[in-house]
């Protein structure tokens, strides 16, 4: 099995012992992204909408580094700390796909890294 590590300065650097993404064959596995602005290193979390937009921008940058886009995404996992925020997260998330939605699950968790409110991971294929 061959694997290629995908790293881009257009998404935040990992905050632990993992990579932004790993490409194996035609499959891309993107680590969970949170709302860190890759330029400033600051959290973009004034509200759940801003937070979700930054997460999706980070995912978009990683997809682009692997020469892919949201149309290549097969599956996403969304982790949120408050299921009452599901509607707002879902509304922002949906704007990034052109009616070509991937499979997905959304799970409420008690806490996320840096105490953010949303984290999203993806699996894509070329």
Image (spheres, helix red, strand yellow):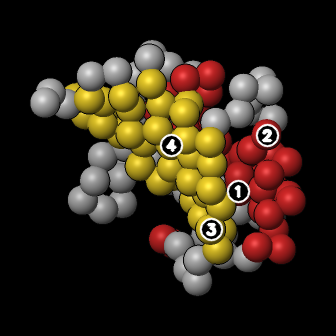
Q: Which residue is mark 1?
A: 51
Q: How far apart are the alpha carbons under marks 3 and 4? A: 14 Å
Residue bearing mark 2: 94
Residue 91 against residue 117 in the figure, above or below? above
Marks 4 and 1: which is nearer the front? 4
Of labels 4 and 1, earlier in sequence is 1
Q: Which residue is mark 3?
A: 107
Q: Which residue is mark 4?
A: 122
Q: Quadrant of the N terminus?
A: top left
> Which residue is drawn at the image coordinates 61% and 27% (left, top)?
70
Considering the numbered disc 4 on the image, is that residue within a helix, a strand or a loop?
Answer: strand
Q: Quadrant of the C terminus?
A: top left
User: 48 and 46: which one is in front?
Assistant: 48
Q: Is residue 58 visible?
A: no
Q: Residue 75, position in %: x, y? A: 55, 41
Q: Position of residue 80 (x, y in %)?
A: 66, 68
């Amino acid at each position: 099995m061959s694997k290629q590590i995908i790293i881009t300065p257009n998404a935040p650097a990992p905050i632990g012992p993992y990579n932004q993404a790993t490409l194996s064959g035609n499959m891309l596995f993107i680590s969970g992204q949170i709302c860190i602005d890759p330029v400033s290193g600051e959290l973009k979390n004034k509200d759940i909408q801003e937070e979700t937009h930054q997460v999706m921008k980070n995912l978009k940058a990683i997809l682009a580094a692997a020469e892919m886009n949201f149309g290549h995404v097969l599956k996403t996992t969304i982790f949120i700390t408050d299921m009452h925020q599901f509607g707002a997260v879902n509304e922002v998330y949906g704007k990034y796909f052109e009616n070509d939605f991937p499979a997905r699950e959304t799970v409420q968790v008690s806490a996320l890294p840096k105490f953010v409110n949303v984290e999203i991971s993806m699996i894509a294929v070329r």
